[in-house]
Amino acid sequence: MDDQYFMKKALEEARRALEMDEVPIGAVVVSNDRIIARGHNLTEHLNDVTAHAEMQAITAAANYLNGKYLNDCTLYVTVEPCTMCAGALGWSQIGRIVYGASDPKRGYMSYAPLALHPRTQVTAGVLADEAASLMKEFFKKKR
């Protein structure tokens, strides 16, 4: 299994968010080539600004592992994490982050590129066009 395989699983989560009229961002956490957590945006559904896909997936992964550190895990997320999520990922000491579409307006690279743990590896642009397409579809309907 490779990055595209797991990003497709994150895109499935993003589609679940879209079906709920949430911003279509999805995430999965992988450990030892196995998905241990999934998440998608639930900010509207839960009336909680912190209920981003990454936050849902971090919490589920920590619960699965019965520990707060995710240093042997990879997060696959369809869009570049925001600064809040990057900070949480930094505190979790996640080993690797793979994201699809960049987010120059809200992504952490524009505001807090040092938010992640120093050992976290980042891969950007995996299935970026598919992730961006979901976002464009959602916001086109909103305008």
Image: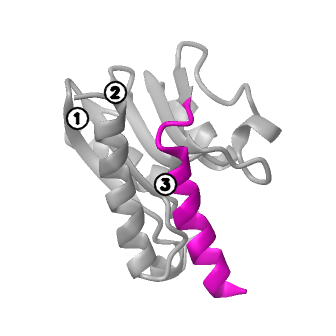
Three-letter residue code for mark 1? Leu
Mark 1 or mark 2: name the one nearer the start of the chain: 1
Q: Which mark is residue 40?
A: none
Distance from the alpha carbon under mark 1 to that under mark 3: 30 Å
Q: Which mark is residue 130?
A: 3
Q: Which residues are magenta?
A: 124-143
Secondary structure under tag 1 reads helix
Three-letter residue code for mark 2? Cys
Three-letter residue code for mark 3? Glu
The residue depicted at 41 percent of the width and 36 percent of the height is: 75
Cβ atoms under marks 2 and 3 closer than 8 Å: no
Residue 17 among those drawn in magenta: no
* Callout in the foreground (1, 3): 3
| Residue on which disc 2 sits | 73
Identify which residue, 143 or 36, lies in the foreground. 143
**Label 2 neighbourhood size at 10 Å, few (<14), some (14-19), many (20+)?**
many
Mark 1 or mark 3: name the one nearer the start of the chain: 1
* Callout in the foreground (2, 3): 3
Residue 126 among those drawn in magenta: yes
Q: Which mark is residue 65?
A: 1
The residue depicted at 52 percent of the width and 65 percent of the height is: 134
